Amino acid sequence: MDELSRVMCVEDDADIRMILEFSLGQLGGFTVLPCASGLEALESVAAFAPDLVLLDVMMPKLSGTETLLRLRRMACMQGVPVVFVTAKAMPDEVEALLALGASGVIVKPFDPVTLPQDIRRYWKPRHVDPK
Amino acid sequence: MSIPNELANAAHAQQLEALRVRFILGLQGRLTEMQTAPDATTLHAALHRLAGAAGAFGFEHLGALARTALQACDPAKQDGSEQPLPSVMQELTTAIHGLLARQSPEGHHPGDGTL
């Protein structure tokens, strides 16, 4: 699809999932799939086919970084931006997250009013390798 | 946090306010989780979630207290000048109780977590 319309949000905190759904769904007009864990995201991503994934870093069991690495191995995630949402804002921490293959890092606390616009800068029409 | 001017849609403003109220009402559960945390890792995780959520809902002071508590319970990030953990946890507890009290039927606006 050539527009950003489907966003998967992976976040273990229920309140933050709610505000993400409100921000991106109600204010941003996106179709949002909230996932409470990295495992849930991995199980849901193929069927949901997101245009962009927002991913918390600190999550129990399967961390955000490990979730990213596993998502990147999935064919359905080719070309899909994954943006970390994290309180870790030191330059070296951000660099480390980007080095893992994230398209960007949004620092918590995020502004639910501006978040729909903020995520657009990380999206581009997907180029799928014909191979 | 007052309702942002950008939220021209009254329905959206009401929805956001409802979410904020739900967050406040959940603070007692978060506080209990922190107070009964069996180890530092569990406490750290609970504080981390509170810091992120409080800020997203506009409770900057509460979020700042949670971040201060995070630093106080992380030996790697201390330089000797930090407020002791029990002291900052007491401040956090007071702030949470204040928000809950304001949200009670006899209370008024949620405020920003300050007393």
Image: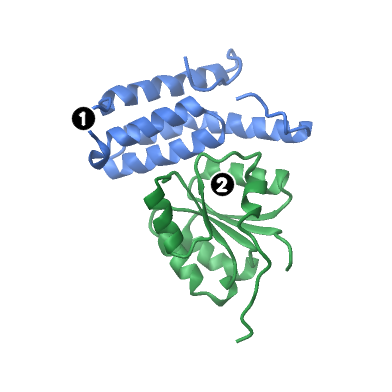
Quadrant location of the N terminus of chain A?
bottom right
Q: Which amino acid does label 2 sit on?
A: Arg
- Residue at disc 2, secondary structure: helix
Residue located beneath label 1 in the image: B80
Image-quadrant location for residue A79: bottom right
Image-quadrant location for residue B1: top right
Q: Where is residue A32 in the image (x, y as percent from the top left)?
A: 66, 54
Q: As rendered, which of A30 and B90 lies closer to the eye?
A: A30
Residue located beneath label 2 in the image: A17
Residue at position x 35%, y 30% from top? B68
Picture colour for chain A: green
Above or below residue A65? Residue B104 is: above
Picture colour for chain B: blue
Q: Position of residue B56 (x, y in %)?
A: 55, 37
Judged by depth in the image, the label closer to the viewer, 2 or 1, is 1
Q: Mark 2 lies on which chain?
A: A
